[in-house]
Image (spheres, rainbow, N blue to C red):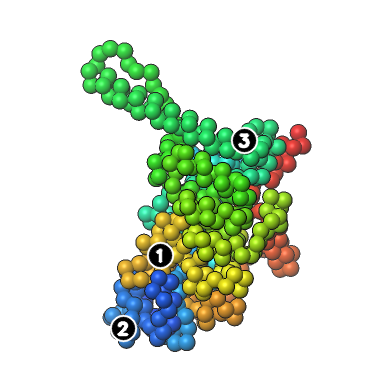
Amino acid sequence: MKKLNTLLVLVLLSFGVHAQDGSVLIKNATVITITNGDLENTDVLIQDGIITRVGSDISAPRGVATIDATDKYVMPGIIDAHSHLNTVDTNEGMNPVTAEVTMEESINPNSIGIYRALAGGVTSIHLMHGSANVIGGQGETLKLRYGVSQDEMRFKDAPRTIKFALGENPTRVHGQGRNIQPRTRMGVEQVIRETFDAAIDYKRNREAYLSAKQVFDRRKRGTPPVPVAQNLRYDVINDILDGKILVHCHSYRADEILMLMRVFSDYGVKNYTFQHANEAFKVAPEIAKNGAYTSVFSDWWAYKFEVYYSTAYNSTILNANGVVNSINSDSGELIRHLNHEAAKVVHYGGTSKNDALKMITINPAIQLGIDNKVGSIEEGKQGDVAIWSGHPLSIYSIAEMTFIDGVKYFDRENDADDMRIDINPSADFTSAQNFEQVLQGREHDACMEGAFILTEQSLNR
């Protein structure tokens, strides 16, 4: 019994790191602020989860731990605007429009991928529905507080988001797989327009009914109005049209990017991001003119037919045209080295280092509507930072510590080794390792997870 109690105490202590008050002083670092240049020999004080001071010769308040970061770099936590890292369910593939579903309950807070992302300096992700649907489910913006509950992972007060998808994915799942619209890119546009129109009609009829019902309930005479039932799907669509939900749209080709901008212009939708957007460089001026954003891969393409054409200069061209562009992972493996993906933009296109780092910090924060809270090191923002052994764009640099709200969630030097592996007692090491690599690379289309079996079954009927 005594041994059991001792073990219990050790287990509780092992989780104690996450019970800190979120206060730490990082001293003598080169601080990459993103919004105010690079500051050498600078201190960052985080108190109760908030950056309270950035400057020199800051003294630690009583009880606040001090970390000497001499010869190291401190930068904001990396933000991944497109992730399926710790999802439980990805695609609700039985209808081309599923706006009523949400990733809210599809979060696995215990996924080992969270810890691995922290090891790459990542602090926040945008967890999204997949791309089987023209209008898919609602997303969740999360902080990677490894070891907490679903609710504790949610990014407090982050705007609502939703996933749209254009091109082959919805046409394959629904047109080819289930013989329903859309089967072509023309059909994709009409699904969006018809859904928007139906939602507008529903809202008008619903509001008229509720108004009439209010009058009837007050007067208690006459004929009661014909009920118009609440429709959760159309409620969400109207929130999109009213600007209450940010759209993140899976896309590849320039023609479909132009199409969606025309549709959104017709319906007054203003705040949206094109995800993947491999051909966005062809229409960069038009994207900038419409105030749209892009979130792309640095140099991934040709993994399926509609994305056979792209360029490693995509991010540079978008950035040069004034488009707020981010670089995302869409992968449980790539998320661990998004700093390298940003470095490719410097290598290929000659983009400045600071602009490249914006693509994995403040720019995705803008696209998620959380740039007033994270994405740069500024007084008053939340204490999501990482300490790097060297400049984050160097291939030789590694993240040594990662903090969220001033709480240390990754410590390369002191974390137990078994925190880094996903133990599977039924598989030997070699087969487990190989299986993981297959799933985490582009051989596995993360956006279509859960939809392949559905499509194959439908085609074989």
Q: Is residue 288 left or right of residue 253?
A: left
Label of residue 374 in the image: 1
Query: Label 3: which residue?
Result: 187
Give the amino acid type for the residue marked by disc 2 in the picture.
Answer: Ile
Give residue 334's position: percent from left, percent from top: 61, 65
Q: Is residue 432 visible?
A: no
User: What's the mark number on residue 58?
Assistant: 2
Per the image, label 2 sits on a secondary structure element best described as loop
Q: Nearer the viewer, mark 2 or mark 3?
A: 3
Could you say which disc has been placed on residue 22 in the image? none
Which of marks 3 and 2 precedes in the sequence?
Answer: 2
Instruction: Looking at this view, name the residue that lies furthest to the right.
Output: 460
Name the element at disc 1: loop
Q: Residue shown at 57%/73% (left/top)? A: 350
Image spot of residue 92 (x, y percent): 58, 42
Residue 144 position within the rendered picture, expressed as x and y whole percent measured from the top left: 48, 63
Mark 3 crowdedness (10 Å alpha carbons): few <14, some 14-19, many ≥20? some
Q: Quadrant of residue 440?
A: bottom right
Instruction: Say which of 49 and 56 sits in front.
Output: 56
> Which amino acid, by three-letter code, is at mark 1?
Val
Q: Earlier in the sequence, mark 1 or mark 3?
A: 3
At numbered mark 3, what does the secondary structure look like: helix, strand or loop? helix
